Image (spheres, rainbow, N blue to C red):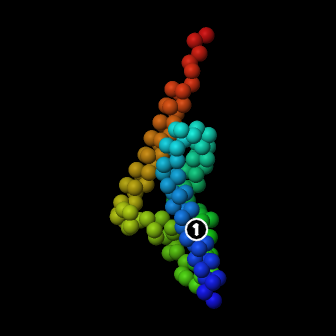
Amino acid sequence: MVFPALIFRAIETIAVTVHFAFIGYVVLGGFLAWHWRRTIVLHLFAVAWGFGSVLVGYDCPLTDLENWARGMAGGPPLPSSGFIAYYITGVLYPVDAVNLVRLLVAALVLVSWAGFVLRRRAAVPVSHS
């Protein structure tokens, strides 16, 4: 039946889209917190989850959702290497640059956090009592 397969392909597409958005937020969300300060806590959790899934290797529920939808639509699951290896590594940067890209992402996150702290300190009035 074609109709159910279309629904599962739509779920797959939504999972992929949310996954890319999440990765974008992990990389750049600290800069959003410069303007929307309260989002820094959400960014801390997103970075902990994102870095943990890459470094520790625990399963991502978005990858699980995509694999489920792919299977229900009659397609193959993602390779065991996961979402980033399938959609990003070798597509947006060469495979042999993985460690450099990870280092650059970590540096970008740290720069965004340092900027957040500096901007926060600059915004807090100094008491002269």
The quadrant of the picture occupied by the N terminus is bottom right
All told, the count of numbered labels is: 1
Q: Residues within 10 Å of mark 1 (few under 14, many from 20)?
A: some
Q: Secondary structure at mark 1?
A: helix
- Looking at the image, the residue that sits furthest to the top is 129
Please tell me which residue is depicted at 56% across the width and 18% down the height of the picture. 126
Up the image or down, 1 lies above or below 21; here it is: below
Q: Which residue lies most toward the bottom here?
A: 1
Compared to residue 116, the image places residue 49 above or below, namely: below
Q: Residue 47, position in %: x, y?
A: 55, 50
Q: Which residue position holds label 1?
A: 14
Q: Position of residue 58 (x, y in %)?
A: 59, 62
Q: Nearer the viewer, residue 8 or 66?
A: 8
| Residue 99 picture quarter | bottom left
Quarter of the rendering containing residue 7: bottom right
At label 1, which amino acid type do we have? Answer: Ile
Q: Residue at x 51, y 61 (%)?
A: 20
Q: Percent from the top left, x then y, of residue 15?
A: 58, 67
User: Can see residue 55?
Assistant: no
Q: Does 81 appear above or below 51?
A: below
Position of the C terminus by quadrant:
top right
Q: Residue at x 54, y 31 (%)?
A: 120
Instruction: Name the residue located 55 percent from the left edge and 57 percent from the top edge.
Output: 22
Residue 42 visible in the current orientation:
yes
Q: Which residue, as the protein is rendered here, is positioned at the far front?
A: 3
- x, y percent for residue 41: 61, 43
Left-right relation of 126 to 95: right
